[in-house]
Amino acid sequence: MKFVGIDTGGTFTDVLLFDGTTNTLRVKKHLSTPHDPSEAFLDGIADIAASGWSVGELDRISHATTVATNTVIERNGAKTGLITTLGFRDVLAIGRGTRPPFAVYDLKWSRPEPLVPRYLRLGVSERVDAAGHVLMPLDEAELLSAARFLIGHGIESLAVCFLFSYLNPINERRAKALLTQHFPDLPVSISCEILPQWREYERTNTTVADAFVRPVMGNYIGRLVDSLHGQGFQHDVLIMRSNGGVAQAATVADRPIETFLSGPAAAVVAAQHIGRQAGLPDLVSMDMGGTSFDVAILVDGEPNHATEGEIVPTLPVRVAMVDIRTIGAGGGSIAWTDDGGVLKVGPHSAKALPGPACYGRGGTEPTTSDANVVLGRIDPDHFLGGTYQLRADLAEAAIDRLAAQLKLDRNTTAQGILDVTVANMAQAIRAAAAQRGIDLRAFALFAGGGAGPLAAPAIARDLKMTTILIPRFPGMLSTIGLLLSDLRFDSVRSFPVILEQADMPALAEMLRVMAAENQQRVEAEALDVDIEIRLSLDMRYRRQNWEIAIEIDLAQFDTDSVASSFDAQHEALFGFRNDGQLHEIINLRCVATGRLRDKATLLSRLVPTFAATPGRPIGHRALFDEVLRRVVRAPIFERDDLIAGQRIDGPALVVEPDSTIYVPSDGVAELDGFGNILIRLGVASVRSSDAGPH
């Protein structure tokens, strides 16, 4: 079996080639091509030919992409129109009337404009009531007239969202049939297919976002698939989605909004499997790349799943997703001073172009990567396995300019950049843990991303965590997750009802229908899988405003057992239960997972062949130690030279092709039997030797 995983990030595009026959693993990083992400993808495919493989002999290509996310962030998607129920064209503008937390006290903040301007939002006559009864059939002539008006104003994609279509989609489905018949080249997204769920604003926003990215994603996926098939690839490309599962390219092109957490979700899948294998299932998974910092918490090897997120503030998107928190903090995050002269880092990034100053590609502003170069924690001669020469002189010049503004010396400024970055990242983790009532001291920090192993010790120290797990190829974490990801299909249907008054056999039948539909979706992917179905209900006490998910078993599906399950989970989350209060069911949910049968074999073959004797330092380097706050002389090890059980006392550096691991003076690193490096903080006797000025 020959598998390829390709993850397109904001700074780098990562390529992993795995040959299960010879148990060989190759990794390669390319600078991303933001103007056309497919260029970097195809550069990665070219690596296959360079390795002696032909594209035609590949068994699987899995891909994670930021195209949908960046399209919304940069607002360069299709010119989109919206047709909704007459009188409701301003749902997008009205929203929820709330401010994001960062803008609560900002008098200058204004809400971003909706993705569809008002003149491209039209209402048509139709009406379904809150019980799902059709009060007014769709006015077909009015619909076609509205579509012609929008097309005349240059729309490239169309969203349709009618009131209560989640209860009865007949008018929406008729609208799509008419639009497809009369305007076959116009992409159409309808809410009953994208999100048949209660809450009008979120449903409309999600449908509009899907329409906004649909032509862009369709063109992108089409170019990739056509190119691969032209080179002899005989299968469909698997695309990572935000729910932590993959699906074939054609499936994803039909619901492109489901890819907006594509790469970060793949990284969490890798953390899940590697953590379990290492015997550390309780993890804080961090993925620090060039542009962003993503964090997820796994309890007993399972990440939390959410049903709503924001691509940008005030733009809620309701799709099934791994619960990931993202902030603008990465190797390319730019350091700057505000009007009061206070040091800030991010959220703006130098990205791949012009990149950090040390890349020598035109960037002049100081970044976290420049700070690590200045402090000696990144060796310019060994970056990306020595395939890319960094410019230490340009990094120093960029840091020196900032140091002059702050009236500090070079090392203090560089360490200050990292301290601010760490504080931002630690706060993101702390907030995620507090929301779930988790004591981080009992968890291990899983450090992924090219920049993650450099920042992990300081983050763990800030959070009073003592164990750090660094997998093989941490900078390739998402590509590893791609090869370990199962098929997964999530579906939701709103059906508001009081549990104590519900027709339970009828509800059970609706859930069986959803399960059968999702099972068919998995089977249609035509891969060798074992299918698993999980059902749940979004529930709340009557008159509450938000719901929690309760997993159910149709074999014990009765009023008392469902109510008891809800009461127990509500008490676990919030510390109390309302005995005697009526329960409301809001949504029915189904998850169908197609577990790949070759995954266990793949995971076992990711374990390296260890060297016969303990690895010795390949050199020494002067670096600024964050604990001692002075320059010390530290040994440098090659990761592939280490053997299982080998111990390395800090301060030290461990280099590998895609990342550098920093072992601080208060830490001890040890290689486990699976090739992971475990760093324990607070167990080493702090020792170092001065190296003089750096």
Image (spheres, helix red, strand yellow):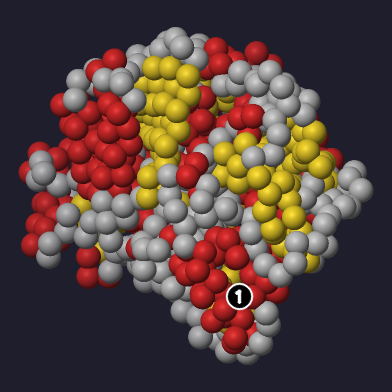
Look at 68% across and 82% down and name the residue there: 408
Q: Residue at x 79, y 47 (%)?
A: 650
26 relative position to 308: left or right? left
365 w.r.t. 75: above or below: below
Q: Please state which of residues 207 and 88 is positioned toward the viewer in this rendering.
A: 207
| Residue drawn at (61%, 60%) of the image | 372
Picture quarter with the C terminus = bottom right
Is residue 264 rendered to the left or right of residue 121?
right
Q: Pinpoint residue 103: horizontal percent, then vertical percent.
A: 57, 76
* Quarter of image, res 146: bottom left
| Residue at numbered disc 1 | 344
Does residue 80 appear to the left or right of 240 in the view shown?
Answer: left
Q: Would residue 54 be seen by someone viewing this image from the given angle?
A: yes
Check the image and report above or below for 467 versus 249. Answer: below
Q: Quadrant of residue 276?
A: top right
Residue 666 position in % (x across, y down): 84, 51
